[in-house]
Image: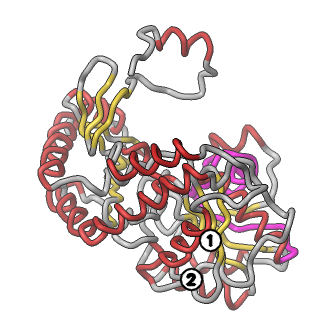
Amino acid sequence: MNFESNYRELESQYIMPAFSREIMITKGSGCTVTDADGKQYLDLVAGIAVCSTGHCHPKVVKAIAEQAAELIHCSNLFYVPHQGALAKKLVEISGLPGNAKAFFSNSGAEAMEGALKLARIRTGRKEFIACEGGFHGRTMGSLACTHKPAIREPFMPLQPFTSFVPYGDVQALKGAITEETAAVILEPIQGEGGVIIPPPGYLKQVREICDAKGVLLIVDEVQSGMGRTGHWFAFQEEGIHPDIITMAKAMASGFPMGAIVAREGLEFGKSEHGSTFAGGPIACAAALASIDVIGKVLPEVAAKGERFRAALAHLNPRVKGLMIGITIGDHCADVQKECAVHGLLVNCAAHGNLRLVPPLTITNAEIDKATGIINAAVSKFASS
């Protein structure tokens, strides 16, 4: 495919400068991407935990192409091809008991907006509790429950009102709940926060507190879901059932797609929520194909994560499947750039934490190559 060679000039003149970027990615296959200059990289960013089936997986490409040739859009005024089948699949892999149901969106932020609306309208309460270090989106509602001051404070005041408690602190959470609390919102692993893993048993304790206090539990699986941690959803490791799950990112291998799944008794009535594009036929076809591919590689995810752990052991990585965080500190950006020089894409999340979220299809040979580059890059700046 041809692209504009003057893309930097065009962006500078016509695109709002909301992003910092240096490389144009023009092609991808599996765990490898190619930039505008023809340089290849092993990709451990994967669109920020999006391309979990690898770039342009043949089954996903086929599903998108076949559906695009039949019907691209029809809106939710009509039954949409593949929607029912996908909703059934999401309910099944979520493991929520009873007659759980799904509602589709176009992104993780939109999924959170839907979760907030659903919690408010079904409980009649208006306030929420979220965690320090948590990230749930940049739309106004999802931003209200996102803690990061740098992106939150310029848009204050925000609604719905949200109280923030330290991540992993169940006593602080318990003390923050009031009669106006509709739900507690948390990530089972904080992704944007730097792959921060809570203490064992934390989710179980939060579930028990929510049950005792009569508030809902919303678990944000946008980054940690869809097989990323070796389970379909990270909360499943502790054997709990949230009231509402938000998901997106890897759902459709890069085609914009999100959803919420809510337990029995929590659902939108007619006209309480809606979307023109959400759950479109191409998105649903891509998601079904993606789930099929992920299901086949899911049994290998934990072992691949342990291979990363062993190779990076001296850096004390935080590992849950193929969601990996390494505290680098002030040189995180330097390490990221050094890795890119040597053909490896990694990402710096918050607080100097290197985040690795590669395709779940990554091979052992690719893991070994990637960890070798990371170790060399970290060593280069270790004494600085």
The 10 Å Cα crowd at callout 2, few under 14, some 14 to 19, many 20 or more, is many
- Image point (51%, 46%), residue name: 255
Q: Nearer the viewer, residue 319 or 229?
A: 229
Residue 286, image x and y in percent? Answer: 48, 53
Crowd rating for badge 1 (residues with CA inside 10 Å; few <14, some 14–19, many 20+): many
Q: Residue 262: horizontal and vertical position, in percent? A: 66, 75
Q: Secondary structure at mark 1?
A: strand
Report the amino acid beneath label 2: Leu
Q: Residue visible at 30% across and 45% down?
A: 44
Taking depth in this image into account, of 125 and 155 the one nearest to the observer is 125
Q: Do residues under tags 2 and 1 come within 8 Å of each other at their CB atoms?
A: yes
For the point 41% across and 58% down, the residue is: 290
- Which region of the structure is painted magenta? 123-148
Residue type indicated by callout 1: Val
Give whichever of 369, 259 is nearer the camera: 259
Q: Is residue 131 magenta?
A: yes
Tag shown at residue 96 = 2
Up/down of 363 relative to 254, above or below: below
Q: Secondary structure at mark 2?
A: loop
Instruction: Give the quarter of the image for residue 261.
Output: bottom right
Left or right relative to 241: residue 367? left
Q: Is residue 197 visible?
A: yes
Q: How is the image coloured?
A: secondary structure
Q: Left or right of 43: which side holds 206?
A: right
Whichever of labels 2 and 1 marks the residue nearer the N terminus, that label is: 2
Residue assigned mark 1: 261
Using the rendered image of the protein, determine whether residue 147 is visible from the camera's viewpoint.
no
Q: Please give the name of the residue rendered at 43% of the width and 46% of the height, measured from the top-left corner.
A: 48
Q: Is residue 97 magenta?
A: no
| Residue 352: percent from left, percent from top | 40, 44
372 left or right of 1 in image? left
- Cα–Cα gap, marks 2 and 1: 9 Å
